[in-house]
Image (cartoon, rainbow, N blue to C red):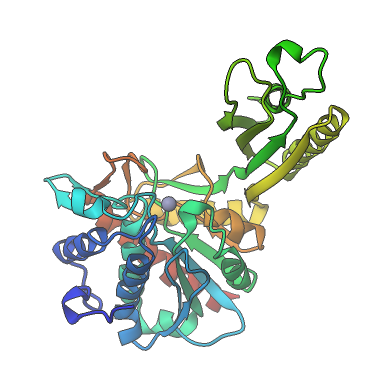
Amino acid sequence: MKPISTESCLNTKDNTFSPEDFLLDLEKLINIDSGRGAAEGATRVGLMLAEPLVKRGWIIERHNLSPNIGECIVLKNRQAERFDALLLGHVDTVFPAGESAERPFYRDEERAYGPGVYDMKQGCLAMVHSLLAMSPQTNEALNIAVIFNTDEEISSVYSTPLIKSYAERSDYAFVFEPSMKNGGRCIERKGILRSTFQFEGKACHSALMLTDDGRSAIAEMGYWIAALSELNSKETGTSVNPGIVKGGKAANIVADFAELTIDVRIKTLEEQDKVLAKLAELGEHARSVGIIVTEVDRRTRPPWMPDERTKRYAEHLCELSLSMGIPFEIRVGWGASDGNTAANCGAITVDALGPGGDYAHTADEYMLLDDVEPNIRFFHAVLEDLAQLKAAQ
Ligand SMILES: [Zn+2]
């Protein structure tokens, strides 16, 4: 890995927030590819974000979890057994290497654009600014850990154990995914089950399929799709999307191979169990018709339902925010995040704390410039408030 040149260092200055400096820093972060095929860039982005905190004496750990992704960075204001606050942000984007050169950072009067400008390099940078603005007393009162992970956009396949190991030892977790419109913050997200199944049948001439021993992998896959679609329900919120299908060589050949990738969204663990039971039942069906099914990939995020403590805390934050004249609404997030993991580890978790905008995962992605300062001010207040809550305990 290349050393980080001073030229690439962030402009962040202690205790002073300058919107212009924020945008200059954001530009540097956006113009480094950190998505698919850009592991080194992801490491660089994490280290650049860490630098101002390291300069202030924070402890840094670099976790090389897989050659497929950049290093995940952990920062702590001191060594501790337990943490009052765990702050989570991901520096990876959905975009492939080369994207930043193709459409680098730019801005107009209202918005900033570029890969990851809204999901979520702006959130990571806002997090750092909020921490730099912390009073010495608050820094003394709270044990804080920060994780910048590099694989969130692939369901945190490598970093989840690391995130869990900190979330299990943290009272509160704060996730800096972008806020939603009108100050929408999030304490609830659906879970994900994403699986790829390969179906192996037996080929024969299509004219002989009733007499010969041909077994169609595609027909069985179709049976699975139809059966799984029955789980779709507006009432329970469960959805099953057969997102990718492959298979077949010619119309007159009974297909001996097919592949299906499903993306399931569930609100509760009971619903997740229902889906898993259905998959087990379908496995039985495949066996009964002589099709071998292998699950070659599975990625999961547990559903995140807020408990009473979390609901109470969110209401408290709502009051705090409104008292500062900053909008705050509690919403259900439409995707999953590392917040799902943190909340399932028992930490009181609040997500969508980053500056807002729109069009994540597309070339139209933007961040609202006016959203930056209030988000940093708000989270700074959350930290000061948390120190007081802790002192009162
Ligand atoms: Zn994100």
Reply above or below: 130 against 309.
below
User: Residue 350 at what x, y percent from top left?
Assistant: 51, 56
**In the figure, 197 relative to 14: above or below?**
above
Q: Is residue 9 above or below residue 203?
A: below
- Please give left or right for residue 193 compared with residue 335 in the image: right
Residue 265: x %, y % from top left:
61, 38
The furthest residue to the left: 109
Question: 193 or 131, which lies in front?
Answer: 193
Residue found at x 59% / y 61% = 342
Tally of numbered discs:
0
Name the quadrant of the C terminus.
bottom right
- Residue 342 can be seen in this image: yes
Residue under the image location 66 percent in, 52 percent down: 308
Front residue of 114 and 343 = 114
Q: 311 or 118: nearer the eye? A: 118
Residue 383, picture quadrant: bottom left
